Image (cartoon, rainbow, N blue to C red):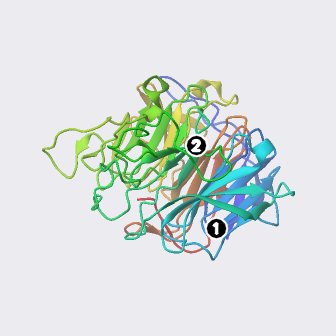
């Protein structure tokens, strides 16, 4: 289990140029929030400013009500899914009309390793789901490998449900799913789930009336889009796509170019801006806006959010992302790339920087925390150096918000980075 603490300060400056400000005076105060087992996701229901929902990889969703952990889980399918490594309950998304229809959607790997998106509704108790209402929206076979499951569900500004699916696993996309537009793996899917059951194909999906691709497909050429998001102000799409052996990338598609409609992001012909596995190749797809190499222990991007909160106006419009392996957090606005908080300040990213002087801080997921637009980030602390793709301890929660920066010390079993 993971003891979670809250740090009552956050970075107080973000300079466009020059020397970063000094750390704030005083010692941060900590308070205990609760224990979580392998948390991988944090979110809130629309317009809900009182509760946060913590997704645990084993299959449970726990409620934090005014920073108090509720004893009974909101949702629990532990023991009925494949969990561990890159499998498990990976995200939850609340319907934009959740306040009136009570619908929410979960993304998990079933006991056979296949990807499932299932709809449920809340019970008469707002802190408890009615699990008898399960309606499988989509099932995607994922039989050969346990990795590259993707895992993100997100409602877009258009009210459609978007799902990021990995390429099916193995090294180098051996089944060619990324570039196969008829395959649902290695894609961003877009579904209309407003009906009574299941889903329909939105009328403006690129392959709705085009047999050259599956009608569910919105974007292709993705390897493992572990986390993606939409800018709440502009609607622009940001995807953190986990790389193979050399490069991590952030793909951006603006509203002006239909936020990813029909876009091919290049995998497995391209890794970042480079030919995969080697030159030469015919460059394919939309090039990433940000890429960084596997240097200084970096190895697995975790996509984040564009900051639209009010607590730190100087970072308005900056997109923040991180790397699971080296613990760094970086941000980008236009062509300026920035690094994360260190010693209370934000540093220009001549080199990406870790959140602390310890290389043990490892990021697993970012989330919008509440309706206020502040940002939360999941971090893992490992007690030893990683060996291959595995780390000795599971993820813990770190949240950068107006008042809270969560940190933790882990004392539990192994977890695998999203690769």
Where is residue 15 drawn, in percent x and y? 53, 25
Which residue carries the number 1 mark?
59
Label 1 residue SS? loop
Name the image quarter holding the C terminus: bottom left
The crowding category of the residue bearing disc 1, from other C-alpha atoms within 10 Å (few below 14, some 14 to 19, many at least 20), is many
Q: Indicate which disc, 2 or 1, sits on the residue closer to the N terminus.
A: 1
Q: Nearer the viewer, residue 298 or 51?
A: 51
Is 117 rendered above or below residue 219?
Answer: below
Which residue carries the number 2 mark?
192
Q: Is residue 195 shown left or right of residue 414?
A: right
Disc 2/disc 1 C-alpha distance (Å)? 25 Å
Judge whether residue 385 can be spotted in this image: yes
Where is residue 208 drawn, in percent x and y? 44, 39
Q: Is residue 215 shown left or right of residue 81?
A: left
Q: Nearer the viewer, residue 107 or 234?
A: 107
Q: Is residue 94 shown left or right of residue 144?
A: right
Where is residue 110 drawn, in percent x and y? 54, 69
């Amino acid at each position: 289990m993971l003891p979670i603490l809250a740090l009552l300060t956050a970075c107080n400056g973000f300079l466009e140029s020059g020397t970063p400000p000094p750390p704030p005076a005083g010692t941060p105060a900590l308070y205990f929030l609760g224990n979580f087992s392998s948390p991988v996701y944090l979110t809130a229901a629309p317009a809900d400013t009182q509760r946060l929902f913590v997704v645990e990889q084993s299959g449970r969703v726990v409620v934090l009500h005014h920073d108090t952990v509720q004893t009974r889980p909101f949702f629990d399918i532990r023991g009925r899914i494949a969990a561990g490594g890159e499998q498990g309950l990976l995200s939850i998304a609340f319907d934009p009309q959740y306040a009136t229809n009570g619908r929410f959607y979960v993304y998990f790997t079933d006991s056979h390793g296949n990807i499932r998106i299932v709809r449920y509704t809340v019970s008469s108790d707002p802190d408890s789901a009615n699990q008898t209402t399960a309606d499988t929206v989509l099932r995607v076979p994922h039989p050969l490998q346990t990795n590259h499951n993707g895992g993100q569900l997100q409602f877009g500004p258009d009210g459609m449900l978007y799902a990021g699916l990995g390429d099916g696993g193995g090294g180098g996309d051996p089944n060619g799913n990324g570039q196969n537009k008829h395959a649902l793996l290695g894609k961003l899917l877009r579904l209309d789930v407003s009906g009574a059951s299941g889903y329909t194909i939105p009328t403006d999906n690129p392959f709705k009336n085009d047999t050259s691709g599956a009608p569910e497909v919105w974007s292709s050429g993705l390897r493992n889009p572990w986390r993606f998001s939409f800018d709440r102000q502009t609607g622009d799409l940001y995807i953190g796509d986990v790389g193979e052996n050399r490069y991590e990338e952030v793909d951006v598609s603006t509203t002006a170019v239909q936020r990813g409609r029909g876009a091919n992001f290049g995998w497995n012909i391209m890794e970042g801006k480079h030919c995969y596995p080697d030159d030469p190749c015919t460059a394919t797809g939309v090039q990433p806006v940000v890429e960084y190499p596997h240097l200084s222990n970096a190895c697995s991007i975790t996509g984040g959010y564009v900051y639209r909160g009010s607590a730190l106006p100087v970072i308005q419009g900056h997109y923040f992302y991180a790397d699971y392996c080296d613990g760094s957090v970086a941000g980008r606005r236009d062509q300026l790339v920035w690094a994360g908080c260190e010693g209370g300040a934000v540093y220009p990213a001549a080199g990406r920087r870790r959140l602390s002087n310890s290389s043990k801080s490892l990021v697993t997921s970012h989330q919008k925390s509440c309706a206020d637009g502040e940002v939360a980030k999941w971090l893992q602390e490992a007690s030893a150096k990683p060996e291959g793709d595995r780390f000795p301890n599971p993820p813990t929660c770190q949240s950068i918000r107006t008042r809270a920066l969560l940190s933790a010390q882990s004392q539990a079993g192994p977890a695998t980075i999203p690769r």
